[in-house]
Image (cartoon, grey):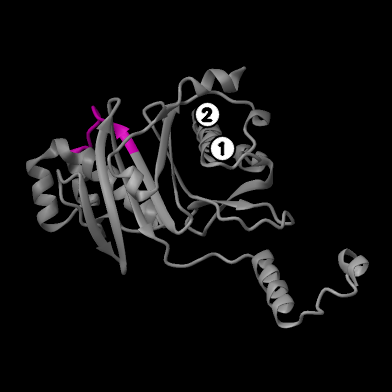
């Protein structure tokens, strides 16, 4: 019942570039979920949350991620879990021992203003999404924490653009899979330009920004710099290579004895 009620509150976000970028994005209000209702939640991680607000935001994000993955075509969430890199950037992976290696989409999750947002992109890409209420603004004395030089001067002249700049840089940080480990002052964004290409650390990033349902949103996407290879991937590849190099490789295996 809860799932059906929440699905009615999900909004699929729309932007003209999403189809060409191979991106899907969704939002919904934050809700209180039980652990059993969210297959992609990790009990140990949830137990560390100090406030109900943090718990609800996290659980809602993971629940919406599950919905998004199902919409992507992944029906069985029980074979998946969420891993994080050393900068805590999340990715979807198969549970060890599942012996599955079909490509999984890249993911990004954001929460603000009582809502959660999820973006999915092709496995060859890294994606980042960020959102803030359009009515929110950043204090002027914090501008130099995220901008320098001409960008900072432009921001001081257009303080209402602070959330545009903030969400854009957050989206880029997520697409780079570094979060706040990437200094936002190193990310140069053209204020007021809703569709732009930027370069940072040898990566070319497409950045789109827009407003929808009283939120300022930004989404960044880039070609993955490397492919993650698991131990199971390496074993499957070794098995495939052995089979291709030796036609009799399978003789003696249980599954082939009846065919010898």
Mark nearer the viewer, 1 or 2 = 1
Q: Is residue 259 magenta?
A: no
Seen at 53% across and 27% down, the residue is 52
Q: Going by the image, does 189 lie left or right of 174? A: left
Helix, strand or loop for disc 1: helix
Q: From the top left corner, tell me how far across and down residue 2 is, in percent.
A: 59, 19
Q: Is residue 246 above or below residue 103?
A: below
Helix, strand or loop for disc 2: helix
Q: Is residue 166 above or below residue 151?
A: above
Seen at 74% across and 56% down, the residue is 97
Quadrant where the C terminus is found in the figure: bottom right
Report which residue position mark 2 lands on.
56
Q: Is residue 248 above or below residue 46?
A: below
Q: CA distance from mark 1 to mark 2?
A: 21 Å
In depth, the one of 148 and 245 nearer the eye is 245
Q: Is residue 136 magenta?
A: yes
Dot 2: few (<14), some (14–19), or many (≥20) neighbours within 10 Å? Answer: many
Seen at 89% across and 68% down, the residue is 259
Seen at 36% across and 33% down, the residue is 13
Farthest bottom residue in view:
245
Give the quadrant of residue 230.
Answer: bottom right
Give the quadrant of residue 255.
Answer: bottom right
| Magenta stretch bounds | 131-139
Report which residue position mark 1 lands on.
70
Q: Are marks 1 and 2 in contact (CB under 8 Å)?
A: no
Instruction: Give the mark, 1 or 2, whose residue is nearer the N terminus.
Output: 2
Q: From the top left corner, tell me how far across and down residue 24 is, in percent.
A: 41, 41
Farthest front residue in view:
259
SS majority, magenta? loop
Q: From the top left corner, tell me how far across and down residue 188 is, in percent.
A: 20, 57
């Amino acid at each position: 019942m809860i799932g059906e009620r929440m699905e009615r509150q999900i909004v699929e976000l729309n932007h003209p570039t999403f189809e060409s970028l191979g991106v899907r994005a969704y939002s919904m209000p934050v809700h209180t979920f039980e652990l059993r209702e969210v297959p992609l939640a990790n009990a140990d991680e949830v137990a560390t949350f100090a406030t109900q607000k943090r718990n609800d935001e996290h659980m809602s994000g993971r629940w919406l991620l599950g919905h998004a993955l199902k919409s992507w075509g992944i029906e069985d969430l029980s074979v998946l879990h969420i891993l994080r890199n050393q900068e805590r950037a999340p990715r979807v992976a198969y549970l060890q021992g599942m012996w599955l290696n079909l490509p999984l989409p890249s993911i990004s999750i954001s929460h603000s203003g009582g809502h959660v947002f999820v973006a999915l992109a092709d496995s060859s890409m890294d994606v980042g999404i960020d959102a803030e209420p359009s009515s929110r603004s950043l204090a002027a004395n914090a501008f130099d924490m995220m901008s320098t030089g001409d960008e900072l001067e432009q921001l001081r002249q257009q303080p209402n653009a602070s959330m545009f700049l903030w969400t854009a840089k957050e989206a880029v940080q997520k697409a780079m899979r570094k979060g706040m480990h990437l200094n936002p002052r190193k990310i140069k964004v053209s204020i007021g330009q809703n569709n732009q290409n930027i370069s940072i650390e040898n990566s070319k990033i497409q950045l789109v920004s827009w407003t929808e349902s009283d939120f300022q949103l930004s989404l960044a996407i880039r070609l993955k710099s490397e492919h993650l290879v698991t131990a199971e991937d390496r074993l499957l590849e070794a098995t495939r290579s052995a089979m291709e190099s030796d036609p009799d490789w399978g003789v003696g295996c249980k599954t082939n004895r009846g065919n010898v």
